[in-house]
Image (cartoon, coloured by chain):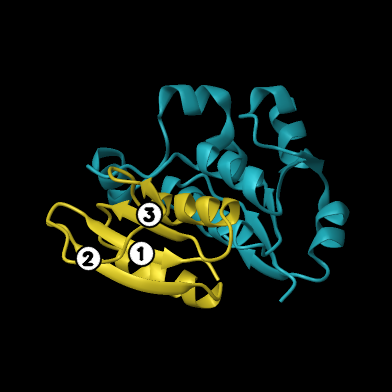
Chain colours: A cyan, B yellow
Amino acid sequence: MTGYAVVLASEEFERVQAVSMIASVAASSDIPVEVFVTMNGLNAFEKETIESGDFEGGRVAKAMMEAENESPLFTEQLEKAKAIGPLQVYACEMAMDVLGNEIEDYADVFDDTLGVSGFLNRAQDKQIIFV
Amino acid sequence: MSETDIQADVTVDAIGSACPGPLMDLIGKIKDVDDGTVVELLTGDEGSKNDVPEWVEEANHELLDIVDEGEHWAIYVKKT
């Protein structure tokens, strides 16, 4: 096992949370994880979206936000895990370009921006999970 | 209240935190302490009592006990 490379292409709250949870527990257990946030996945990480809490989501998203026991928001979760284990989070250059966004428009969880080749290089020895 | 004789060296209070908060807090603490240390994890998240043992086994630590304290659970793990 040489780790996971996760492609997060959805802004759906449940999927984003699930990626942050799985990536965080894996990295905290010393399993290397690379997360490549692309396409609509990036929307969830926009500072504006996070400040407003206006996430796309369904029943579970609603229940999670109202739950008595709180799950940390994906941004806090990823930040925490990065301090403990081998976790890197990258933002897709192409999706940022078409939206006219800069890395500063997003939550401070990204190690860098990345293109497809960069992602594939980092994913070579890993199991790919597409979300 | 507690029905265990186990004496914990350190306590991690993750009450009020849902999956995977308690597990993450436990992992962080286990990394910090010396071998042989008994860590007590307090959690109100029901899923923790199944998921924490899975992690403990895979990480080769020792699960000492899981105690139902009514409003929460106390999970005792020894770092090995």
Q: Residue at x 24, y 39 (%)?
A: A66
Q: Is residue A50 left or right of residue A63?
A: right
Q: Is residue A110 visible?
A: yes
x and y percentages locating residue A34 in the rendered image: 71, 55
In the structure shown, which secondary structural element does the residue marked by tag 3 occupy? loop
Of residues A101 and A80, the one drawn nearer to the viewer in this rendering = A80
Q: Residue at x 30, y 71 (%)?
A: B65
x and y percentages locating residue B48 in the rendered image: 33, 62
Where residue A105 sits, quadrant-wise, is top right
Q: Are marks 2 and 3 in contact (CB under 8 Å)?
A: no
Q: Is residue A89 left or right of residue B52?
A: right
x and y percentages locating residue B45 in the rendered image: 28, 55
Marker disc for residue B67:
2
Q: Is residue A90 above or below residue B60?
A: above
| Residue bearing the label numbered 3 | B19
In the structure shown, which secondary structural element does the residue marked by tag 2 occupy? strand
Indicate the amino acid at tag 3.
Answer: Cys
| Residue bearing the label numbered 1 | B76
Using a 10 Å C-alpha cutoff, classify the residue at mark 3 as few (fewer than 14 neighbours), some (14 to 19) or many (20 or more): some
The chain under label 2 reads B
Q: CA distance from mark 1 to mark 3?
A: 18 Å
Q: Residue at x 25, y 46 (%)?
A: A63
Where residue B5 sits, quadrant-wise, is bottom left
Q: Earlier in the sequence, mark 1 or mark 3?
A: 3
Q: Are marks 1 and 2 in contact (CB under 8 Å)?
A: yes
- Quarter holding the N terminus of chain A is bottom right
